């Protein structure tokens, strides 16, 4: 459970970075295209065609931005990462406590933690492939290693 939560935490963080970047790219692209379009609308010559093309580009990027809502997805993946991180810590503590707890109590705690993991796995957004790849790379490079684990 701890290892799964660790990969899920890193994956959700990387997914959040992707969604945040997309939010800025789409929002910035829309703003720039709209601004240049406004200037070119009053220009002479064939620049009105360019203004029309930029207006179309601004409309498309705005529509994609509103439809995907990458800012909301980034917030959601960040919240999921925090929940996975909490589960990771709970799993570490449970592993330490197992040696000193009665079996029935340990089993109850394990089942409770497993139910939380299942609920989060069901509600969390899927992690994009690129985010998973970057998360795995982060972990392999020691990004989730604690001093006690070394």
Image (cartoon, grey):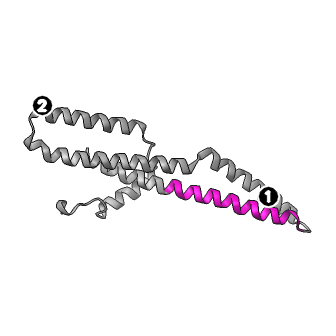
Residue depicted at x 86% and y 62% = 41
Viewed as shown, does residue 145 lie left or right of 56? left
Does dot 2 land on a helix, a strand or a loop? Answer: helix
Q: Position of residue 39 (x, y in %)?
A: 82, 66
For marks 1 and 2, give the one nearer the viewer. 2
Q: Which mark is residue 149?
A: none
Q: Quadrant of the C terminus?
A: bottom left
Is there CB contact under 8 Å for labels 1 and 2? no
Viewed as shown, does residue 45 lie left or right of 126? right
* Res 131 → quadrant: bottom left
Q: Position of residue 124 (x, y in %)?
A: 42, 41
Identify the residue at the far bottom of this view. 44
Question: What segment is highlighted magenta in the picture?
Answer: 18-43
> Marks 1/2: CA distance?
68 Å
Residue depicted at x 14% and y 33% = 105
* Res 10 → quadrant: bottom left
Residue at image mark 2 = 104
Between 133 and 95, the residue placed more toward the observer is 95
Overall secondary structure of the magenta section:
helix
Between 4 and 36, the residue placed more toward the observer is 36
Q: Position of residue 55 (x, y in %)?
A: 78, 56
Q: Position of residue 139 (x, y in %)?
A: 31, 59
Q: Residues within 10 Å of mark 2 (few under 14, many from 20)?
A: few
Q: Residues within 10 Å of mark 1 (few under 14, many from 20)?
A: some
Residue at image mark 1 = 53
Q: Is residue 15 above or below residue 36?
A: above
Residue 17: in magenta span: no
Q: Earlier in the sequence, mark 1 or mark 2?
A: 1
Does dot 1 land on a helix, a strand or a loop? Answer: helix
* Res 120 → quadrant: top left
């Amino acid at each position: 459970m701890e290892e799964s939560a660790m990969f899920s935490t890193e994956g959700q963080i990387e997914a959040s970075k992707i969604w945040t970047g997309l939010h800025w790219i789409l929002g910035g692209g829309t703003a720039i295209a709209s601004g240049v379009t406004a200037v070119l609308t009053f220009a002479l010559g064939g620049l009105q065609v360019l203004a029309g093309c930029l207006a179309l580009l601004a409309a498309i990027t705005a529509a994609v931005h509103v439809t995907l809502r990458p800012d909301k997805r980034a917030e959601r993946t960040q919240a999921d990462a925090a929940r996975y991180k909490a589960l990771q810590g709970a799993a570490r503590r449970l592993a330490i406590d197992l040696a000193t707890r009665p079996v029935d109590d340990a089993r109850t705690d394990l089942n409770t933690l497993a139910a939380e993991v299942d609920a989060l796995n069901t509600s969390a957004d899927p992690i994009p492939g690129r985010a998973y790849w970057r998360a795995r790379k982060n972990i392999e490079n020691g990004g989730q290693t604690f001093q006690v684990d070394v």
